[in-house]
Each structure stands twice: as C-alpha cells, then as structure tokens.
Amino acid sequence: MGEANRIELDAVIVGAGFAGMYMLHKLRGQGLNVRVIEAGSGVGGTWFWNRYPGARVDIESRDYGYSFDPELEREWRWSERYAAQPELLRYLNHVADRYDLRRDIQFETRVTAAHFDEAAARWTIETDRGDRLSARFCIMATGCLSEPKDIVFPGAEDFAGEVYRTFDYPEQGVDFTGKRVAVIGTGSSGLQTITAIAPECAHLTVFQRTPNYSVPANNHPLTADEQAEWDAEREAYRARAKAQPLAFWNEPTEALALEATPEERHREFERRWEFGGFRVGAPYADTGVNLEANRILADYAADKIRSIVRDPHVAERLTPRTYPFGTKRLCVDTGYYQVYNRDNVTLVDLRETPIERITADGIRTSERDHPVDAIVYALGFDAMTGTLAKLDIRGRDGLTLREKWAHGPVTYLGLMIAGFPNLFTITGPGSPSVLTNMVMSIEQHVEWIAAAIAWLDEHGKATIEATPQAEAEWVAHVAEVAHQTLYPLADSWYMGANVEGKPRVFLPYVGGFDAYVLACNDAAANDYRGFATG
Ligand code: N01
C-alpha cells in the first residue's frame, strides 16, 4: 500500500451499527482519535439495511437498547413490546445525535483491505474511496449477519419483474397491491416479510426449502403501566439479564421435561406460548441437550401448527421434520402460520418440487411454472465469517485471514486472532453473540476492548494479540460445548451449513454469556492471560 495521503489515527472501526457506534463513543471518551468507516449512508448497521416489511426485533425492546448510560435509557420510550425496524433505526439515530457520533463516521465508504505493518506495529486500512488510514488498532464492528448470500438460481437475471432482497430492501418500501409475489426463503426475514405482505398482494407464493419453528411474539403497544413497570425495575432487570446465559431474561429453569408429567409439561408449554417469544424455546433444561426431551417440545409445536393451519397438507409441510426444535434459529412471529389460511397464499415445498430455474415470467419448479410479478429473496447470510473473509485482511508475515480461517474460524474468545495483533472482532465467531441479546454482547465486547487498550497504554505496551495456545484451547472449548447440545444436528447457519463449501463448524459460543464474561474478565484480571502483549 502506498504512503501518500495517509491519515494517522489511533483506531479505525469498521461498521456503524450498535457495535461501531458504542466503540466510537467509548474510545473517544478515552481520548483516542478514531474514525468509523461505514458502507451505508447512515448509522444503524443491521437496522439500516434490513428494511423489509415486517422487520422487527424478536427479543423485547427493553432488552434491545444500550445499557451503558442510564440517562439514555430513561429518556428513550419504546412504543411496542417488540420494536419494529423504523423505530430501532430512529433509536440508533437518536444515539448518534445524542453523543455527536457522526462527525467521526465516514459514510458510503467500504473498507477493502487492512494490512498489519509489523515494523510500525500499525494497521493500514484502505477503502473503496481511495482512503489510506493508518491506525494502531483496527476494530471490526462488521456484524454477524451482514454478508447476504448470493442469488444462485439459474436464470435469475432473466426475470423481467421486480426483484428485491430482504437484506437491502428499498427504503421507500414497495407497493404490492394487485401483484403476484414470490418469497423464497423461510428464515426469520422470510417469515416476517411473508406475514407483512400477504394481506396486500393479489397472490403470494412462498417457496420453502426447510420449514422453521416459529413461536408467537404476542407483540402489542406498550401501555403506560408496562412502561412504568419497566422504568421502575430497569436496573434490577438489567443486572439479572446480564447474569443469564442469553443476556436477557428467558425464565431459565433447572426442571427437566423428562421428569415432568405430560400434564405438567403441557401446562408449562402453554404458559410460555401464551407469554410469547423465546421463552417458549426453553421450557425445560433438557430440551436443548436431549433428543427425547426435545421431541416432546417439537411434538407440542407441531400440534400448534396443526391447530392453526386449516389445511392438514399445508400444516404438515410447515412442520420441521429434519432437525431438533431450536437447533435452527427459532423464529418469533406475529401471525405467520395464520397466513396459510388465506386464499391468496400458496406454499410450495421445494423438497418435493425444487426450483429448476427462474424464467422471464416467474419461477419454474420441477412441477410447473409459477408466474409472478415480483420476487423477494430472503436467502440469509454467510454468517459470522462472510464479511471478514471477503476483506483483504493480512496480519503478521502477510498471513491472510482467509488462509487462517480456511478450515473454520479460529479466535480467542471471539475477540482476537493469533497473528493479527491489535485487530479486534466485536462479537466475532467463538463469542456468544448471536445466541444472546446482541446488544449486551456488543456492550461487553466494546467495554473489554476499551479496557484492554487502556491497559496497554498504562503499561507502555504497543500491541496485544491472542496466543496460538489460548486460541487453540478456546476453539476446542467452543466445539466441545457445542457438541454437548443438539445444535450440531441441524444444517443451520450456526454450523456454516447454509453456504456451499463453508467448513461445518459451530460458529458462536454456546457456553452462555455469563460463563463467557467470567472467562473474559479472568483473562483481563490476570494481565491479559492468553494474550501476548509487547
Ligand atoms: O436467513 P436464514 P434470515 N434455495 O438463513 C432459504 C436474524 N434475523 O435472513 O433452511 C431455497 O434464517 C433457507 O432454506 P434452508 C436471525 O438470527 C433476526 O431469514 O437453508 N431456499 C432459509 O429458509 C436469523 O436467524 C430477525 O433450507 C434457500 C432461508 O432461505 C438470521 O438473521 C429478523 C436457498 C434463509 O433463512 C438470518 O435470518 C430477521 C436456496 N438456494 C433475521 N438458500 C429478528 O427478528 C437459502 N434458502 C430479530
């Protein structure tokens, strides 16, 4: 990389979502000269891009905001139990205004390369706008679900109608009135889109390869009483949530499904179903680790689908049969299964009749042509590693991250990578991240990284990096705890199984946020044990 026009900084942060925004605020507070590089034209990350109809957070709004500033918490009011995308984006813009973040964020710019210069112990970061930034620290706040999967269907470019992706849906929305619409993909994004657009299309055809389990959100506008209750117990609630494996309150239990009577189980399942959200997925301690216990919960969910969907053939096709309950990311919906009782909705099961190609007029399966005016692709992401692997990241001795991760990501604590000094990954692979309340996981990483940087300065050290040994032990531990659960039994994006050729490795850390925080704190308290500083 050339030396002309180099800008000298203490830190470059890549991405201005929840993670990059807080990292900027935190490091600026420590007196560092920081710049954030963001591809979008505004802040918000996930909530900037994913503007598809029905996009909504699926843990409660009260969990899904920053907790680092009690003032910020007090002044912000959520309107619904689960906030929708426009409100989340308003919140993130409010945060950007409140802490005057935009002056250090360079928008509409993509980082293309980050190379470590060993002699100078600095990173050189290049962008698609020709910037050349030199920084001591490079912090990847690039998100876990930010690299959408390619549209792989033959003939996709021949389609003459409208084409949308949930990932970068038009900001102004789309009017589907009177149109025949196809949605391909039935993960969380597909489910929310399908539920939102079914009432407005002339006809909606859903192309499903694998059904997902979905549970009701029981979303509603927040009443003044609920607001008051949230306000009154906020501090205690946050403290309790942060002590949980998921970093939000999920009503964890030690009780075992296999030890409960059928009546007790049914009562418990129903109680949680009525309440809504993720606690439906964890009614007993053994459903995530024992196939027999899991089967009982799966059967209950299948009964629910049958009780909602009137056509038994459609209900059967909507019922997952190929993986245990909860091992693909559980969806949380607002009337999803009910959509299939509408006359204008058709479900196409791609296991029975696969897509052969996209034509100018629509979608051809092995059975027939489905003419449509618009296709919405909801195909998911190259999760957790896709965005980083795409960048030209080179550490010590020119080692590329792509080479380093060729057989799956290796990190220590999902925070740092041996051979890549002063490069941090916020909620990187090997951290609890996507299995938890992301905002709490992000805050914890940001605070750990900021403290590590402060410690380096206090101790006159230039660099920090994971040791190969600590990294290897952590990777083994991440795999070990994953294999104590049923997660590896599913072809999920957690396992990298949704992207052809991606190594089959369980990507996040399933050992729990609480246990993970202890491990991070323990390393820090022992002079960054497991990290080499120099
Ligand atoms: O992606 P997904 P997503 N032919 O990977 C199908 C978070 N999120 O964007 O399962 C046909 O879950 C694929 O089928 P299969 C959340 O963590 C949160 O929906 O691979 N189908 C699947 O049905 C979530 O888990 C919220 O067989 C193909 C779908 O596309 C994560 O983001 C909202 C295909 C992809 O589902 C990703 O969700 C939205 C092909 N070639 C997202 N390729 C909240 O509510 C893929 N599919 C907070």
Image (cartoon, rainbow, N blue to C red):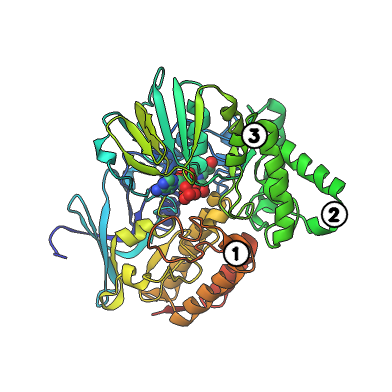
Q: Residue furthest front?
A: 367
> Which residue is tagged 3?
312
Q: Which one is earlier in the sequence, the residue at label 1 or at label 3?
A: 3
Mark 2 sits near ligand 1, with its Cβ under 8 Å away: no
Q: Which one is earlier in the sequence, the residue at label 3 or at label 2?
A: 2
Question: Depth-wise, is mark 2 or mark 1 nearer the camera?
Answer: 2
| Label 3 residue SS | helix
| Label 2 residue SS | loop
In the image, what residue type sits under mark 2? Ala
User: Above or below — where is 458 with respect to 276?
Assistant: below
Determine if residue 348 is in view.
Answer: yes
Find residue 517 and name its label.
1
**Residue at image point 24% right, 36% down:** 158
Q: Quadrant of the C terminus?
A: bottom left
Q: Name the residue nearer the viewer: 333 or 352.
A: 352
Determine if residue 51 is in view.
Answer: no
Query: Residue 107: which quarter of the image?
Result: top left
Where residue 333 appears, x then y in whole percent?
59, 36
Q: How many marks?
A: 3
> Which residue is tagged 2?
260
Where residue 81 appears, x then y in whole percent?
63, 34
